[in-house]
Amino acid sequence: MEFGQYLGFLAFLTILTIGFWLMMFLVSFVFYWLGGATLELIKEKRNNRNKE
């Protein structure tokens, strides 16, 4: 393996790793957002039911 191929392989691994962690961050953010929205909806329905 030549030095240029080695650098290309390292660049590929770096980009792949950054993409993986970015995807994990975005997916966890979406789950956090949906979970918070669901809890707020449940609280709102519970308050409306208690007021009646």
Image: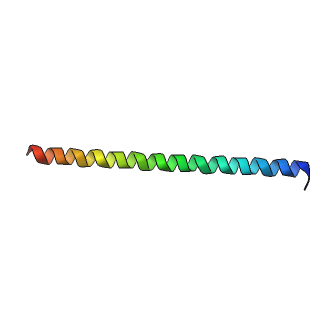
Residue 19 place in picture, x, y as percent: 63, 48
Q: Would you identify the image quadrant in which residue 47 lies?
A: top left
Asked if residue 50 lies left or right of residue 21, the reply is left
Q: Which residue is rendered at x = 68% and y = 51% of the image?
A: 16
Model colouring: rainbow
- Residue 9 against residue 47 in the figure, above or below: below
Residue 2 place in picture, x, y as percent: 92, 52
Task: Check the image and name the residue furthest to the left.
Answer: 52
Quarter of the rendering occupied by the N terminus: bottom right
Residue 26 place in picture, x, y as percent: 52, 46
Q: Would you identify the image quadrant in which residue 48 lies?
A: top left
Asked if residue 46 lies left or right of residue 17, the reply is left
So how many labels did they put on this image? 0
Residue 4 place in picture, x, y as percent: 88, 48
Task: Check the image and name the residue furthest to the right.
Answer: 2
Q: Which residue is rendered at x = 73% and y = 51% of the image?
A: 13
Q: Which residue is rendered at x = 53% and y = 46% of the image?
A: 25
